[in-house]
Amino acid sequence: MATMTAEERQREIVRAARRTGSVDVASLAAELGVAKETVRRDLRTLEDHGLMRRTHGGAYPVESAGFETTLAFRTTSHVPEKRRIAAAAAELLGDAETVFVDEGFTPQLIAEALPRDRAADRGHPPPSPRRARSPRPTTPAFCCSAAGSAPARWRPWTTGRRRCSPDSSSTLAFIGANGISREHGLTTPDPAVSEVKAQAIRGSRRAVFAGVHTKFGMVSFCRFADISSLEAIVTSTLLPASEAHRYSLQGLQVIRV
């Protein structure tokens, strides 16, 4: 392999991390033909520029919290991790009778993972115009769902008895965010989306954040909730255990899957 400049090497590291979800120092050193310390130095530089977050023995890419990624990107990025998170989040349903499901791909997976064998009022959001109609799922409770195809708007829908809006009360809210940090709480770049999320949390007795490891430590424009407003955080084992422990010290359950 021809000798790369530091800039070329760092670009390759970012590409590899975004392609696979994470990288480790030993593998990168072997692939790039450089010393492990050179890779560690590159990772420190990339972290300083906000492109990577280092872990013990490696690093993972961070998504910018300053903009909304497209739904198409979210449905192809970290999918196995998101499916594990969704399955674990759905297990927190308990005896909830009314559930708010936030917009986004991970919340969509949570809705699909909710158990199908409970009798309760059932509500269903309208199908997205960007997706083909699929058979109507059976959900365990009356679900309010933000419209994934237009996150800046709330699209209320009804069953025979109730109309759902962002300030409707719910037993449990599954919430997503562009960024989550101990200092700045839950954030998103869009003020309208921020208000919907804030109202959903205020109107719920329980709130659960579900998101991939790249969301942690990121801060966006609009803060809509404090960490203390959450009952639990569900993420993956790609979030270091030490960082998960710091969040748990604020009095909430942190589940890594």
Image: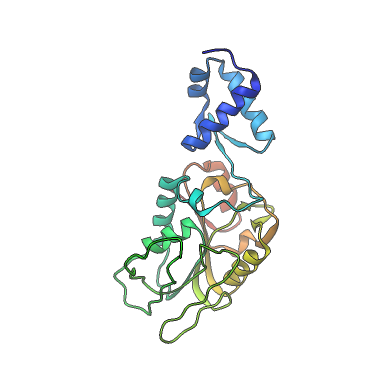
Q: How many marks?
A: 0
Q: x, y (%) of residue 76?
A: 45, 46
* x 55%, y 47%: residue: 244
* Front residue of this view, candidates 88 and 215: 215
* Front residue of this view, candidates 167 and 242: 167
Q: x, y (%) of residue 50?
A: 66, 38
* x 44%, y 71%: residue: 126
Q: Is residue 115 left or right of residue 86?
A: left
Q: Is residue 191 left or right of residue 79?
A: right
The answer to whether any part of residue 56 appears in the image is: no
Q: Is the residue 225 above or below the residue 11 in the image?
A: below
Colouring scheme applied when the structure was drawn? rainbow
Q: Is the residue 133 above or below the residue 183 in the image?
A: below
What is the residue that sits farthest to the bottom in this orientation?
161
What is the residue that sits farthest to the left in this orientation?
117
Q: Is the residue 24 above or below the residue 244 in the image?
A: above
What is the residue that sits farthest to the top in this orientation?
2
Q: x, y (%) of residue 83?
A: 40, 51
* Front residue of this view, candidates 99 and 145: 145
* x 65%, y 68%: residue: 195
The answer to whether any part of residue 64 appears in the image is: yes
Q: x, y (%) of residue 189?
A: 66, 57
